[in-house]
Image: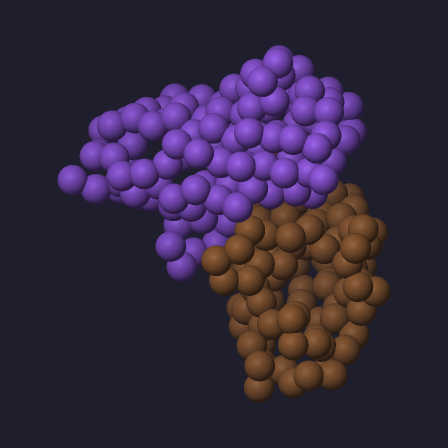
Chain colours: A brown, B purple
């Protein structure tokens, strides 16, 4: 199974800050990686797919990069609605696996 | 507008069974792979099972293999998860999720999710 490891597990930041979350795969997955945002009590929302493609309707302050084993999600200027938990996911092979999540909190 | 609505959750005793349904609308259901993902209280996301658009290809996590069965009825635009031999550790919110298109036996990212349905396993 491919293990997905996110860091940090939690981060505190302020409105307007730039934040970067990393995700490492235990083996190469090409660009078969997605990022999701989840707020409490809600379903996850797809932000980034194919490692760097922005899902329709997602603000351009979100961006993704990376390939094979190392990936990043960057939020360029934090807005109040961005405080949530973020998950990476690999779909390169079954079983599909998610990272453990990164909780983004208000400082 | 894409919509997916899960139903069939609730309280069940250990060893019992439940069948979850996910009624989909707003897209050509038979074209897309569908999946189930669960989230235990306070925990992260866990992929459970996926099925191709045709229904011919299915994959499941080891944690549920032999106990849970994914299926679909393309004439009813509905996805199912039959859950047998339920355990306390199966208690979670269960989400159905639509895959982005990439061919029949091809499974990709999850672009739409249902609102989730709670399954509680307790005596």
Which quarter of the figure is the C terminus of chain B placed in?
top left
Q: Can you say which quadrant of the picture contains the N terminus of chain B?
A: top right
User: Within the image, what quadrant is residue B62 found in?
Assistant: top left
User: In the image as oriented, which residue stretches furthest toward the left?
Assistant: B123
What residue is drawn where x is 32% and y is 38%? B10
Front in this rendered view, residue A55 or B66: A55
- The residue closer to the viewer here, A26 or A104, is A104
Q: Is residue A44 at all visible to an observer of this figure?
A: yes
B56 vs B115: above or below: above
**Residue A55: x, y in percent?**
78, 51
Q: Is residue B76 left or right of residue B109?
A: left
Compared with A105, A71 (above or below) is above
Residue B38 position within the rendered picture, expressed as x and y whole percent measured from the top left = 46, 43
Q: Nearer the viewer, residue A104 or A88?
A: A104
**Residue depicted at x 45% and y 48%:** B39
Residue A86: x %, y % from top left: 61, 61
In this orientation, does residue A69 appear? no
- B90 with respect to A66 (left or right): left
Q: Is residue A96 left or right of residue A60?
A: left
Q: Is residue B11 above or below residue B31?
A: below
Q: In the rendered view, would you say B109 is above or below A69?
A: above
Instruction: Give coordinates of residue A99: x percent, y percent.
Output: 57, 54
């Amino acid at each position: 199974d491919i293990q997905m490891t996110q860091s940090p597990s939690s981060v505190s930041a302020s409105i307007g800050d730039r934040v970067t979350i990393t995700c490492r795969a235990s083996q190469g997955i090409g660009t078969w990686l997605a990022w999701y945002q989840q707020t409490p009590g809600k379903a996850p929302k797809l932000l980034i797919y194919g490692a760097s493609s922005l899902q329709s309707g997602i603000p351009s302050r979100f961006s993704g990069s990376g390939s094979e084993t190392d990936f990043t999600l960057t939020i360029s200027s934090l807005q109040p609605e961005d405080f949530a938990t973020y998950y990476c996911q690999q779909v390169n092979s079954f079983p599909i696996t998610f990272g453990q999540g990164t909780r983004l909190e208000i400082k | 507008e894409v919509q997916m609505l899960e139903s069939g959750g609730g309280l069940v005793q250990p060893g019992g069974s439940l069948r979850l349904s996910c009624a989909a609308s707003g897209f050509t259901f038979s074209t897309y792979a569908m999946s189930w993902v669960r989230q235990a209280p306070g925990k992260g996301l866990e992929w459970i099972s996926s099925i191709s658009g045709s229904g011919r290809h299915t994959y499941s996590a080891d944690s549920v293999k032999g106990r849970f069965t994914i299926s679909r009825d393309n004439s009813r635009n509905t996805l199912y998860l039959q859950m047998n031999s339920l355990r306390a550790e199966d208690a979670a919110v269960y989400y159905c999720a639509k895959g982005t298109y990439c061919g029949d036996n091809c499974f990709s990212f999850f672009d739409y999710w249902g609102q989730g349905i709670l399954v509680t396993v307790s005596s």
